Image: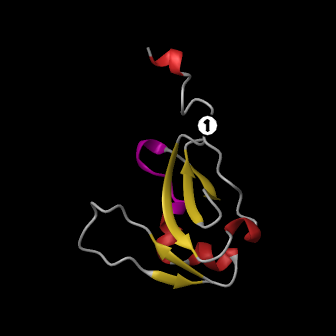
Amino acid sequence: MKIRQYRPAFVTGFDNETSYFSSVEDLQKIPWVANFAEPIGGGLAFDGFFHGDQKTLMAVYGNNKEWWVVGFADVDLSALGIPKWTAPADLFPPRDAMS
């Protein structure tokens, strides 16, 4: 199985890596994946790895308040036991609350 590293288009000067893994444990040991398993700015704790759709690996922080795309796998991550990410209920406030 393999995963392709994701960086936003505005991040230049780097080549995205492709890494191979045979288990969730191997996936989490890939250095550029493992970097996401640390607290981030503002003291937001790492909540865990999730998948957005079946092949998008995400890192979630601060009790589901912030999330980052880590990479794109060539396999269904849910089949490996990685839980599906669900947006927080307050992410999209009702339209009348936006007036």
Q: Nearer the viewer, residue 25 or 84?
A: 84
Q: What residue sits 49% from the left and 59% below the top?
A: 69
Q: Is residue 83 left or right of residue 66?
A: right
Amino acid carrying label 1: it is Pro
- Residue 31: percent from the left, percent from the top? 49, 76
Q: Is residue 5 left or right of residue 60?
A: left
Q: What residue sits 46% from the left and 19% below the top?
A: 98
The N terminus lies in which quarter of the figure? bottom right
Which structural element holds mark 1?
A: loop
- Residue 72: percent from the left, percent from the top? 53, 70
The magenta span reads: 36-43
- Residue 54: percent from the left, percent from the top? 65, 64
The residue singled out by tag 1 in the image is 88
Q: What residue sits 63% from the left and 32% below the top?
A: 89
Q: Quadrant of residue 73?
A: bottom right
Magenta highlight on residue 71: no
Q: Quick one: label 1, few (<14), some, or many (20+) residues within 10 Å?
A: few
Which residue is at the far left? Answer: 13
Q: Quadrant of residue 26?
A: bottom right
Q: What residue sits 29% from the left and 75% below the top?
A: 14
